[in-house]
Each structure stands twice: as C-alpha cells, then as structure tokens.
Image (tube, grey):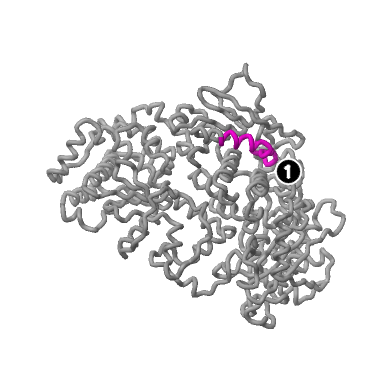
Amino acid sequence: MVLEVPSITPGELHDLMRLHQDAEWPECKKMFPWAHDISFGQPPDFPHSLAIVKSQSDANNSALLRNSLEVNDIFQSWKVRTSFHREGDTCETGNDSNGFQYPNNTKELLNLLKFQIRQLELQVDDVALENAATYCHNHSILPFLKVDPRGLSLELKRYSRNKVGSNTTLKRSGQDVWGRRGLFRRFDLQCAKMIEMVDNIVIYCSQTGGSTDIQTESAPACSHEGNCPNCTTLALLLQICLMFVQKGYVGSGGSLYKTNLFICTYQNFNTDIPQTLIGTPLLDNEFFKNNTPLNLCSSPSEIVCFNNVDKNMVLCEKLELNKLTSATRLEETGLICGNTTDWHNYQIIKKNNISLPHRFEENTSIVNLKSLNYDTDNPTTSISQLYNIPNTKEVWKLIIKCTSNSQMPSLTKIRTYLDLLLDDDASKSQEHLHLTFPASGSIGLGNLNIQSVEILLNVCYLIFQVSQVQELLTFMYCEDGYTETSLLLTAYIIFHFNIPLQDALLRIHPRPFFLFPSDLQILGHLQPVLREFSPQNGSNLKLYANALKFRDKSFQLHISSELFSSIFFMKIPLESNFVNLKGPLPSRILRHLYLGSLDHAQNPALLKSLGITHIVSVGEVVSWTLNKDKIAHPVRPHRAITMTNTNEVAGNTTCNKSRNRADTVVSDKQENGSNVVISENSGFQICQIENLDDNGKDPLFHQINKVLDFISNSEATGGKVLVHCMVGVSRSATVCIAECMRYLQCDLASAYLFVRVRRLNVIIQPNLFFVYELFKWWKKHYNREKDKTMDWHIICRGIAEVNMKYT
C-alpha cells in the first residue's frame, strides 16, 4: 500500500472549516454512551466534520492553527506506565499478568507496526514503516489511538512466551456501560474520539525542511510542501490506526475506513493562511527573548498563549485565579490580602519607580478581555491587563507569607518588630518586616500549646499595632491568594472586631477564603481567647494605644494556664460550628449567584445571612422544604440507582487481578422524567429540578431555560440564588456554568474556568454528558463568533489538562 495524501491550500482549508462550523453536532442520544468509553462500536455520523492535526510541535508553541491537535492528544503515550485494565472491565488472557510493557526501542515499535499491518492484511513499504516507527519513538507515542481497546490490551513482553500481539483482548463487560465507575468524565479520550468520528483530517506543520524527524531530502526553505516527511508519516500512522480500531468494532462486518486525509501546503504561514484560522502566528526566537520592565511574566509568551486560549486553559485558569485573589484591603483593618504575584509586582514597581495606573474598579476576571497585542515600545500596557496592579502608594510595612512549610514565628521576633514600630526612624524606613506563618489546614487542635496560642495572639496584636502607625499597612499573602492565608486572616478578623466566628466569615466575604475542618475546629475553640484580647473589648484599645504612645517595649500578650485549658473544654456554639461545611460558605460565582452543596441548603439561617433569597435544588431535596401533604410531584429518591458487586455482574470473565467492590449501576431502561417545580417556603423561592441523577445519561438542558429564567428573575428583583446538588461539583456546577455563559455573554471554556476558579478548593466535575449539552446549547444560542469557536474536543482537552494535577 502506498499512501498518497492530497494537498490542500489554506483557502480550501478555510472552506472545509466553514462547512465544519456550520455542521450540526450529533444529538446527545447518538453521541452517548459512545463518547463515554473506549471504542467498541461505530461512531455517530457527523457530516462535513473536520479535525486539524499538527505533525510536529514547536519549542515556543507558535505556528498553531485554531482547534488543532497534537499527536500526544490522540495516540497512546509511551514511557508512561499505567494500568489500562480498569476495574469492572473483563479480559481474556492466557497468563496471570494484565500489565502493559512498553517497547524499549524503535525496532520493537517497528515490530508492533508490522503486527498491525498483518492483522489488516495491508502491504506497506518497509521504509515508510521504519519512518513511522522513528516518528513514534521521537514523539513518545505508541501506534494506537487512545480509544483503541485492542491496543490497550496488547501485552508487549520482551520474552518469547508473550510476544507482541499475544492473545489478550479487552472486551465490554457484561454489565451495562452506564454503571462503570469513572466512565462519565473521560475528557482525555475526546480528541481521539474526534479523530475516529470526523470525515476530514487536515495535517500541517511549521517545519521548513531543516528540522524533521525523518531522513529525507530537505524541502525548500520558508515553505511547507505536500511531501513533508513528518506530515506524510503521520498520515500513514493515522490511516493504520483508524483501520485497526475499526477492525475491532463489534458487528462491523468489514472495513469502515472513510476518513479523508489532507496535507495543508503554504509558502508563508503568517501571510498565506487566513487570519481566522491562525491561533498563534509563527514567531521567531527573538520575540520570546524580550523581557518586560515589570517582569510580570518571563517573556511575551504569556500574551501569545492568552490569545490562543484553546491551547492554554491551564494558563487562563492561573490568570483568572490571579485576578480573583489580587490584593484587596479589608475595610477598617489596615490589612491587605493578596497573592504572590501582587507582592512580586509591588516590589518591582517600587524599586523601578514605574508609574502605572492602579485599577481601583472591580476587575476580577479575564473573561471579557479581548486579544492583546504585545507592544515592544510599551510592553506593560498589554501585560498589565492580565494582572491587577497593586496600589504602590500604600506602604506595605509588615509582610506575612503563609506556607505549608512554615513554622510559627518566635515571640522574640515578634517582640523585635514591635520595638521597631516604636522607633520613629525604623518605622519610617523603606525596609519591610517579614514574618512567615503556617498555612491553613496545617495545624490541628491537638498541636496547640500555650506558646503557640500566645504566638497567634501576638501576631494579631502586631498586625493591629502596624495599622495604628500612620500610613503603615500589613500585606498577608500566599501562592494562590487565599488557601494558605485563611486561618490567620479569620483569626485576625475575630481579634480585630471582637466578633464570633460566623460573623467573621461574613466580614471577610466576598474576599475568597477556604477553611479546612481543622481550621474551623481551632477557630471555634479559640474565638473566646481572641475576643478577650480584642482591641474592641473593654479597655484593651486604650491599653494598646498607651503601649504604642509611651513606647512600652516590654508589653506583650500572655495567657494563663487556666485560660489555655478552657480552650479544650468549651463547647463550640451551634451557630459557629461549620466543621461539616466545605469552605465553609457556599461559593459566590456572581453577585447574584452562589454554588454550594446540599449541606449549605440545609442551613437556612446561613443562607439568609448571605442575603440568599432563592434556591435551585438540582436533583436533590432539602429536608426542611418537604411538606408531604402538598407535594404535587413526588421526588424520585435515586430510584434508578442500586448497589451491586461488579464481579457478580461480570461473572467468570472477570480479570484475575480484579477485586470486590461496590459500584453504582443505572438501569438503561428507565427514562428520565425530570421536571421543574417552583414553590415558596419559609421566605425562600425554590426551584426544584426533580429526578436528575449524575449518571452520565440524564439530560438537563430540556429544562435549563426555565431554571435560568428563575435565576434571572431573582437577579432582576435584587435577590441572590443558591444553586446546589449533593456536593456542588457536577449537576449544580453545570447550571452555574450555563448562567455565566448567559450573564457574561462568554463561551463555554471561559464560563467553565470562571466557575471552577470561584468554587475555590472544591473542584467542579460536570460529567461528560452535561458538558456536551452545554456545548450544544452554547453553539445554538450564544455562538456569535464562529471563527473563534472552540470545538468540543478542544474544550475537553483543556478540561483534562486543568484536572491533570488532581488525577
């Protein structure tokens, strides 16, 4: 077989892209459950569909077409050990090992390709196969699509009794596909799924003949020809892999190969290709060597990456979080909280005496930022839009950094800093006073002793005294701007205002913070001590003022052993006991929109304290709203879910190494009967979405307009809405993403990151079915710039990348 891949011009590629953008994506019932799993059956029809693949990556990630894939997105990776046999799957094997041993060199990769060729009964030139093996080796990939069950189950043993292609196959388990654990969030498979489904694949690269993987005659400089060795080799590899995965389809009855392969040719990437197709232009190395005077980023690459968000959702998540947690001054405290970038920028601006406008208006998102241009003459203009510039007219005297590796500061050091405040010359100097403090979640109630409690008290006292010196402020920060500072911040608010824990949380809100259960336990027990020494308690304010006025260098806060002992015997007041709540407040997504869990919804007093007037219950029932005599539509108590043992379902075909466990199995025969019921209870307007499970098959969007109208009406009347499900990560997060798309007029990827960042330490995980519904809903109602549309598989790739550190 000699593969001849036709060339395609940039103009023809543009026409194919137009057809693809106008094409109707498959309906949910046709897309699923096929998209949930590795590929055992044929994909849905998707006429005029297009996938673009780059055959060779650039070191600087330049020369990228919009919505283009790279080889690592679609092929199984090499040199990464993992288990491809998920629990619940069954396999047939003649030995006890279910492992997957990777080939060690190009020769073994070539043997693997030859095995596939024999299975497909093809004739392929030996040189072409050798080039394909070299290509796989250089890109650290195996010649199998990520969704190929036959490739996943092959045992590549180096010893003779388990040769390449041994009798090991991965089969569908006996149980229904809907019930398999971990199946409904396989965002990592969707790029390979797209390759398997599309009608047309266009391959391109930015190599101009000088640097290729394959030994061949050089192509003309500054052009990309149809005989590019990287592109032609990738085309052969794709054809083999597509035919191989199709050969394994159940009941296919023969070859189904129908994909059209093209190679895009051009003379000049930046000028020949229509600008609407270019995500990142071809840039020379000199461009990336330019550093900004602010040094806000290592190079202009952040601007380039930001403009091509479909390849850089991880960066956009970082920038969005940076905006959200940027330096803000807590009213009446003299305390500023922020992130590492704020402190870095503050120092650079002060040191270089750079004049930049401080953004006083609320500017906590990059969602509505348009494409930015990098101006070499004035680089800070565009780069400063990615960050909130701190107000350098403020004097940040005391700098407190909270990290998980930090120890409690010594009382001696705190005493030294207090002495410096009493010295006029030292207090007016430009030198900062630096402290470190343990991160939130790193201290337990059992770790407390008299000294550690006194240190906490005196750190709070030091922050207060800094604020009493004219124009001096304290800056408290951590890497992400909220996680590690939350314990000390909350303790200081209790101390400063002499208020209970629940009021302190509301005082900090809406500044992002997150308290772990251990933090809430400590603060619940320590609040009487913090309040006893508060400057707002009795004569303390006068006492502290005199210590500063009369330069009393011996003054320090101490507690008695009796007071310390009382900490452990006190009972936390019910209204301050938030240990079972995540965060512990629901997450504020928009001014009128909160995202939380069922536990939050079960606490009406907490909701009223936040000004919440409306509740959207997504598939769950709030117990205090139940009135059995007035329920018009009985709520399904997860009627489609039963607990069973997957080994019992799979029977004797289960792999030898599988183990007993409980799993959730959902009957495919039961139809979803979700409906929306709106009612009023105890002063709350409640929108109940009934009979909706997080099972990868229940549809939500046939009801979404009713729900969004409910939220919109609440916002129009000055109300606030809590949207919740059980945990607040999938069903309710999906509703919040839809509301952000509507309210902010943004795309799906931006809305996803917007909600994700504001959910703080609770990671949202809408299942694949919900995200696909969001995608189709967005394309139908809000996709006004088709040239900038981010395709389904590209969104999934971004979600998989931002989730990678948590998997």
Dot 1 lies on which element? helix
Residue 92 part of the magenta segment: no
* Highlighted range, magenta: 693-712
User: Camera-side residue: 645 or 215?
Assistant: 215
Which quarter of the rendering shows the N terminus? Answer: bottom right
Residue at figure coordinates x 55%, y 70% from the top left? 59
Q: Is residue 231 left or right of residue 618?
A: right
Picture coordinates of residue 30 (x, y %)?
76, 46
Residue 96 is situated, as x and y percent measured from the top left of the image, at 71, 53
In the image, residue 385 above or below residue 559 = below
Compared to residue 86, the image places residue 161 above or below, namely: below
Which residue is at a point 68% across and 77% down the rendered structure image? 214
- Most foreground residue, 495 or 591: 591
Q: Position of residue 399 (x, y in %)?
A: 30, 52
Q: Which quadrant of the figure has residue 521?
A: top left
Q: List the residue tagged with mark 1.
A: 177
Quick one: 342 or 713, which is closer to the camera?
Answer: 713
Seen in the image, is 125 located left or right of residue 10? right
* Position of residue 807 measured from the top left corner of the image (x, y, whole percent): 57, 50
Residue lying at the far left in this picture: please name it. Answer: 550
Whether residue 324 is visible: yes
Q: Quadrant of residue 135?
A: bottom right
The residue under label 1 is which amino acid type? Val
Q: In the figure, is residue 67 to the left or right of 254?
A: left
